[in-house]
Amino acid sequence: MAKRTEDVLITSIGIKNSLKRYKSLQALAEYVWNGFDAHASRVDIEIYNNDLDGTGMIAVKDNGSGIDRSLLSQKFKPFYQSEKIYEPTIKHSATHGKNGVGRLTFFTFANFATWKTCYRQNDLILSYEIEINAATLQRYEPSDEQKSDEFTGTTVIFSDLTNSDITPDTARIFLAQEFCWFLELNKNQGFSIYINGEQLNYSTHILKSEEHQYTYPNTKTLFTVRYICWDIKLSEYSKYYYIKEDGTEIAKENTTLNNKGDSFYHSVYIQSRFFNYFDTNDSGMIQLTIGGLSHKKSPEFEFIMKEVNRHLYDMRRPFIKETVSKVIDALDIEGAFPDYDPKNILDQYRKSQISEMVSTIYVAQPKLFTNSMNKEQKKTFIRLLDLVMESGEVDSLFKILNEILDMTEVERTDLADILRYSHMSSITKTIKLIQDRYQAVEDLKQLVFNPNLHANEINHLQKMIEKHYWLFGEQYNLVTAAEPNFVEALKRYLRYLHKEYESATVNHPDKLKQMDIFAVRQDITHGKYHNIVVELKHPNISLGENQLGQVKRYMRTIMEIPEFNASTMSWEFYLVGNKFTSDHYIEGELETNKSHGLPYLVFMAPRYKIYAMRWSEVFTDFEMRHSYLNERLCLERDKLQTSNLSADGIVKQQEQNTAIMPAEMPATK
């Protein structure tokens, strides 16, 4: 029998206007959604190449219930009407179709679409085809039915393609973003998408996954909650999904953390028998369930949502803190911060405080710095914050922010607490710094005094001192460590002094020698530069005439380089080891220089000093300098001792230590 042509109840112009926002990959996704709307658990996409190695034909096949031919007038004629029901505030993911438009979006990438569908009618499987031409979108041509021995489902074939955007790779990328939350929702139901026979993998987009169980104490109602954080923006808002005991989703709604401007994309899957008879209306209607009432005002529901939201905020907080440093850097690059003097300690303290203030506000309301203000507004806002910090009117600042920021009660409380005690953060950081210094010293003692660790000079002692050269003086900048020779050290030093360094040379036999540690500190008040050079020796090497001679050679090399010998420069050299040689050579030098009144001094010349120290003396000096603070902080020193770590492990552990000094200056090459 000849096909009978039917018209869709809309003009071609109306169709194109309604669908003009669709791109080819979005259109392809609509046909996948149509499959899941038809109760499919699997959708297969086949993308066939043509003779020119481009995409020649696309087929989308699902194992759903097919399209009942008697319902065609409902599914194909009313373009902007659909039998699908939408709740105004709580939606169900199983009914995605966008008002019935999905079937016509193919015109964005193909000229022809053919539906081959099989559906069950009583005990029979019936099949037929539907054809639509992109040139006449308002018409469709269904064929007559015939019996079939195939399974139910629908295959849509797109031919005479008009663009090349759809390839297996682009389809995988787009569909993973489109369906990741949906496939995760239904993973226990076996839902899947295949592209050219390969299952779509969305797990690479999962940043973090957690599962927790909560029990409402009064009724012992159990909730199993799965939290997923995504690394991509989802195809729908971040949502709560309410799931029955058998794994079937019953409803969903937006979480409270949407539109924050912080890229915290997440899905929360809440499963419980509580949802087996759950009233999804917002009308306040109540349904009686086994064991009580099941609706949004039930105490069980209020309990679980409170727990879920609390944990969501806990998950979001470290996520925000990971991104806030990037925001601070971006603001710095934009010139949003006042012009702080990098060499002025007070200015740098002010900058750290204002950065912390901005971080605090960002955590409470990220979109304030991402969407709400342009560059000049950000600059003005941060300068106003600086003035507030200077005046100490932090309470007034909170009142203003409370009025202009759209915050939840939790965010408002957090911000108030942080601002109220913001000055405490500096104290906390200082205490942590002191504690970490003690930790570093305890670790260094292990490397020096524990022979079982087999610590060596280069890989262990030197690595530790590179990080903690504060042991030999505060506020230094590390010029070189280990590898760079005198030529490179000179170039870095001149660059630090803001002088020409490219053509700098060293004409000395020892110009290729390498100093273990070379650091510089500028005395801004008096315009002087204090330099230290530290020579470290293996714990098994005793310090004697040969070792002191090596340090003196370093000193003489520096003395003969004019750029190192301005009248504003002074030098201190430290020779450090575990013990002195048995000939008492070092002790003799110490006795000779005793009259200068400087502990550990073994040589002295104008603007040049050399000290020889045993590690035990380095540690004793540290204890004396920090004894007052240690007594008041009452640090539990026994808890700082590292156990069961190798020498490499101890050095690695120091990467998290807050007492670490800035790394050596970048190379000039």
Image (cartoon, rainbow, N blue to C red):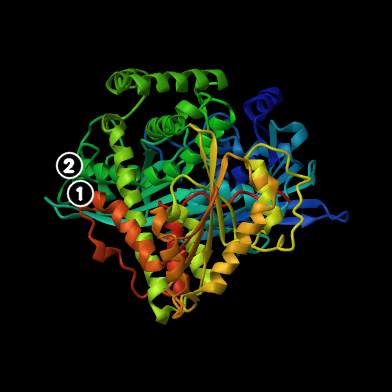
Residue 107 image point, x, y percent = 72, 37
**Secondary element at tag 1:** helix
Residue 340 image point, x, y percent = 51, 27
| Amino acid type at image mark 2 | Pro
> Which one is closest to the eye, mark 2 or mark 1?
1
Residue 644 placement, left or right of 303: right
- Per the image, the residue denoted by label 1 is 632
| Cα separation between marks 2 and 1 | 49 Å
Residue 16 sits in quarter: top right
Looking at the picture, tell me which residue is in the foreground, 69 or 540.
Answer: 540
**Residue at 30% over, 23% down:** 394
Looking at the picture, tell me which residue is in the foreground, 516 or 420.
Answer: 516
Residue 646 image point, x, y percent = 43, 75
- Per the image, the residue denoted by label 2 is 299
**Secondary element at tag 2:** helix
Relative to 419, say whether 243 is above or below. Answer: below
Residue 251 image point, x, y percent = 36, 43
Q: Is residue 487 visible?
A: yes
Relative to 660, say whether 370 is above or below. Answer: above
Looking at the picture, tell me which residue is in the foreground, 271 or 434.
Answer: 434
**Residue at 37% over, 18% down:** 404
Residue 309 placement, left or right of 457: left
Residue 130 sits in quarter: top right
Q: Earlier in the sequence, mark 2 or mark 1?
A: 2
Residue 497 placement, left or right of 399: right
